[in-house]
Image (cartoon, rainbow, N blue to C red):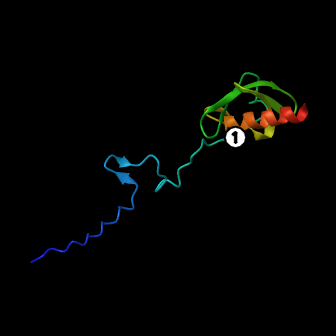
Amino acid sequence: MAQSSTPQPLPPLPSTSSGSYGPSPWSYAGRASEPRFLPAAPATAADIVVGAKVSSIYGPPIGTIAYVTGREAVVRTAHSQARVPLSAFGKSQRGLLLEISLWKLDQLAASAQRAGS
């Protein structure tokens, strides 16, 4: 008997995100209910003081409070200073939080400085 030379179809890949070492860290499958950022409560004016560290809700540190006026605080990063309304700050066990990345805050500060020049 002659054997058929037509290739057999491959079996489908498994639909789970688990591999031989457990779930893939790059997949959010099955973890949709887990927060991807730090939980925060609104910060009060008493929480926002000169020298306080500020982090992004997404995790990384942003900078520190340089000074505070009646309605806003100036956050000093490694590259710029940005004026931020007091109402934008949150707080958690890690300290003050903003819902912005360091890159975006620096970008907004640079565009505000160009507009003010």
* 27 or 91, nearer to the observer: 27
Q: Which residue is mark 1?
A: 100
- Quarter containing the N terminus: bottom left
Direction bottom: furthest residue: 1
* 9 or 69, nearer to the observer: 9
* 8 or 3, nearer to the observer: 3
- Camera sees residue 84: no
What kind of residue is marked 1?
A: Ile
Direction left: furthest residue: 1
Rendered residue at 79%/40% (across/down): 87
- Quarter containing the C terminus: top right
Direction right: furthest residue: 117
- Identify the image quadrant of residue 77: top right
* Left or right placement of residue 4 versus residue 93 in this view: left
Secondary element under disc 1, as helix, strand or loop, is: loop
Rendered residue at 35%/61% (across/down): 14
Question: Measured from the top left, where is residue 80 in percent x and y?
Answer: 76, 27
- Identify the image quadrant of residue 72: top right
Q: Residues within 10 Å of mark 1 (few under 14, many from 20)?
A: some
- Camera sees residue 37: yes
Rendered residue at 12%/76% (across/down): 2
Question: Measured from the top left, where is residue 51 in percent x and y?
Answer: 73, 21
Numbered label tally:
1
Rendered residue at 47%/51% (across/down): 27
* 7 or 13, nearer to the observer: 7
Question: Measured from the top left, where is residue 35 in percent x and y?
Answer: 56, 48
Q: Is residue 117 above or below residue 36?
A: above
Question: Measured from the top left, where is residue 97 in percent x and y?
Answer: 68, 36
* Left or right placement of residue 93 versus residue 105 in this view: left
